[in-house]
Amino acid sequence: MMLPQMREKAVHRCGHCRFFVSIRGLKETRYGCVVDVKAYGNLEKRIPPVVPVLEIIKRVGLEGLERCLEKGEPEQQSCGKFRLKG
Ligand code: SF4
């Protein structure tokens, strides 16, 4: 038997998470996760589907941007912070 919350984690993918966004740079657009960008992660600020890369750099710097992009695989199994896109 699977507990309901475990089942939910097993089924969801990053691509269905509200923290999963397109990050638009000057030359390319890549996927990333903004859960660790404070204003987005604590849902203070509405999360747009496309976030300009400069907005991320302004908030969390280049290292923070790297961390966002590391979690840019839509088929990746969701983490504990998953929130279904609404
Ligand atoms: S499931 Fe976790 S890692 Fe994936 S996009 Fe959501 S918050 Fe980010």
Image (spheres, rainbow, N blue to C red):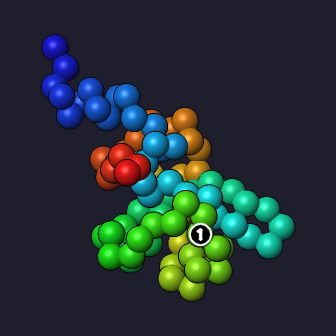
Seen in the picture, residue 52 relative to 73 is either above or below; the reply is below
Relative to 16, 69 lies left or right: right
Quarter of image, res 8: top left
x, y percentage for residue 55?
58, 80
Is 42 positioned to the left or the right of 50 in the image? left
Kind of residue at badge 1: Val
Residue closest to the far right: 27
Residue at (36, 67) in percent of width and height: 41
Residue 4 picture location, percent across and down: 18, 28
Image height of 45 relative to 20, above or below: below
Q: Is residue 64 visible?
A: yes
Q: Residue furthest bottom?
A: 58
Write down the residue under mark 1: 51
| Residue 51 position within the rendered picture, expressed as x and y whole percent measured from the top left | 59, 69
Q: Quadrant of the N terminus?
A: top left
For label 1, count other residues whose C-alpha is less than 10 Å away and answer few (under 14), some (14-19) or many (20+).
some
- Label 1's element? strand
Q: Quadrant of residue 38?
A: bottom left
Q: Is residue 1 above or below residue 49?
A: above
Foreground residue among 76 and 12: 12
Q: Residue at x 39, y 75 (%)?
A: 45
Establish whether ligand 1 lies closer than 8 Å to the Cβ of label 1.
no
Q: Is residue 5 above or below residue 19?
A: above
Give x and y (percent) for residue 32: 57, 57
Q: Residue furthest front?
A: 86
- The answer to whether residue 70 is seen in the rendering is no
Give the residue displayed 51% in from the left and 43% down from the top.
15
